[in-house]
Image (tube, helix red, strand yellow):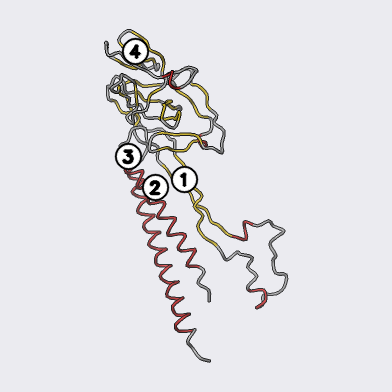
Amino acid sequence: MSTKGIFTALSGALAQTVKMDTIANNIANVNTTGFKKDQQTFGEYLTAHEKEQEVIQVPRIPASIESFYAMNGGDKGFVDQTGTFTNFEQGSLKFTGGKLDVAIDGAGFFEVNTPSGVQLTRAGNFTVDGNGQLVTKDGFAVLLDGEGPAEERTVRFSGQAPAYISDGGEIFEGENKLGKISLVQVQNSDSLQKVGNNNYSFKSNMPAEVSKVAVPNLKQGFLETSNVNIVNEMTEMIMAQRVFEGTQKAIHAYDQMADKLINVVGNTKG
């Protein structure tokens, strides 16, 4: 009798733990502006299925003691945590009336300048910092459309007149137009990786395919809410907890089997 299955059950328990952590983070950000929920993906790893077809030596003899153990690693199955992906489905738009609040209605990202370089975000709850610079809630400078270094594409207000952003993305201070907010579209969302809860950078192993959005579809005075559905997330959390409890029972059962193999069968004298 083999107890290798305890490792399969253990991998399942660990996978559900990761899933619950992901769901908990989604729930914690249900009220975060522009937040996109994450989802965990899993697969089944079977050693024999990972080999080339010609490498697998299938026994050509009738079932026997000799062929019983020729498993080619097929008995070593466990849950493979294939990764986390972000669901970029748009959240609903909420009216705020804020002059510097702007929501993207459709595809696209705002460009912001961070200490780690230019990053992207969907959160349009902008404000003005102590230096008169248009920034995100995290304090990152919002960039203007155009070419050149990020430091030269920031927005600064003099404080002499009210500041606001139009539906077309133009930034005004009174009647003075300071520029147009930079809005870009990413061709392959799989190339993005989340930085914190609201910013995105590009994965090092994938090309950054970005194009400018010539005619932004923005809603001034609105904010995009999180795309987290709290009811769905709670349902997923309950299901993950039940699966986790099931794997715990399986681990306990295999542990009892191992105990009997060692302390009962092993001590039995023929």
Kindly identify the amino acid type of the residue bearing the numbered disc 1: Thr
Q: Check disc 4 and give the amino acid type.
A: Phe
Of labels 2 and 1, earlier in sequence is: 2
Closer to the chain start, of discs 4 and 2, is 2
Q: CA distance from mark 1 to mark 3?
A: 18 Å
Which of discs 1 and 3 lies nearer the camera? The answer is 1
**Residue 102's x, y, as percent?**
35, 23
Query: Callout 2, which amino acid?
Result: Thr
Mark count = 4
- Name which residue type carries label 3: Val
Separation of marks 2 and 1 at Cα, in angstroms: 9 Å
Q: Position of residue 266 (x, y in %)?
A: 49, 84
Q: Which mark is residue 172?
A: 4
Q: Which residue is mark 2?
A: 22
Quarter where residue 197 is shown: top left
Residue 254 sits above or below residue 163 on the image: below
Q: Quadrant of residue 86?
A: top left
Q: Are marks 2 and 1 in contact (CB under 8 Å)?
A: yes
Return the residue at label 1.
84
Determine the image quadrant of residue 227.
Answer: top left
Looking at this view, is 5 or 208 the one in front? 208
Q: What residue does disc 3 label?
A: 30
**Left or right of 67: which side holds 33?**
left
Mark 1 residue element = strand
**Marks 3 and 2: CB-CB under 8 Å?**
no
Mark 1 or 3 closer to N-term?
3
